Image (cartoon, rainbow, N blue to C red):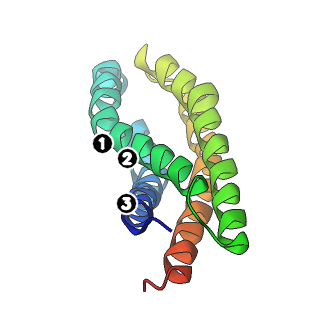
Amino acid sequence: MNFPVLLLHGAATLAMVGLIWFVQIVHYPLFAQVGREHFARYEWLHQARTAQVVGPLMLTEAMTATLLLLSDLTPAARNLAWLGMALLVVIWLSTVFLQVPLHRQLAAGYDSQSAARLVKSNWLRTIAWTLRGFIAMSLLSAAGLP
């Protein structure tokens, strides 16, 4: 097993777990408090700044998840890695087809229904990333890392 890849994968995944829970519980629900007058600018800045943090983490996670599948893994670890990859596909599809379009709608101005759909649909990613966090920790543990 490639330990540097495994460590990088775990770090990226666990960073995304923490980030998605912050977004789900704190950040998205506070959209309603921004105010309609400034919301479009706020949303634009939110997207730009979030991409700077999330983009590298998501790409690192995807690349290292792929490299793990190409690594020499035990059958149990390979099954976990494939499950993690399936969850990653769910996350990316949700991002592209649910969250990004909702953010585009909100960039035109605050809409309470779009904001509510964003919070509700984001639970899919929150749960999937949380499960990925457990998988990453299991892979680290199986490799003999605490």
Residue 57, labelled with which disc? 2
* Amino acid on which disc 3 is placed: Leu
34 left or right, relative to 1: left
Q: Are marks 1 and 2 in contact (CB under 8 Å)?
A: yes
117 left or right, relative to 40: right
Gap between marks 1 and 3 measured at Cα:
16 Å
Residue hosting label 3 = 8
Neighbours of disc 3 within 10 Å: few (<14), some (14-19), many (20+): some
Taking depth in this image into account, of 53 and 61 the one nearest to the observer is 61
Q: Are marks 1 and 3 in contact (CB under 8 Å)?
A: no
Which residue is painted at 71% across and 73% down in the image?
Answer: 76
Gap between marks 3 and 2 measured at Cα:
10 Å
Where 141 falls versus 103 (above or below)? Answer: below
Residue 33, labelled with which disc? none
Residue 55 pos. (x, y %): 37, 37
Which residue is painted at 26% across and 34% down in the image?
Answer: 49
Residue hosting label 1 = 53
Neighbours of disc 2 within 10 Å: few (<14), some (14-19), many (20+): many
Quadrant position of the C terminus in the picture = bottom left
Neighbours of disc 1 within 10 Å: few (<14), some (14-19), many (20+): few
Query: Is residue 109 at least partly visible in the picture?
Result: no
Where 88 falls versus 137 (above or below)? Answer: above
Residue 1 pos. (x, y %): 51, 68
Residue 44 pos. (x, y %): 32, 22
Q: Earlier in the sequence, mark 3 or mark 2?
A: 3
* Amino acid on which disc 1 is placed: Val
Gap between marks 1 and 2 measured at Cα:
7 Å
Which residue is painted at 34% across and 41% down in the image?
Answer: 56
Query: Is residue 30 at least partly visible in the picture?
Result: yes
Assign a secondary structure to mark 3.
Answer: helix
Q: Earlier in the sequence, mark 1 or mark 3?
A: 3
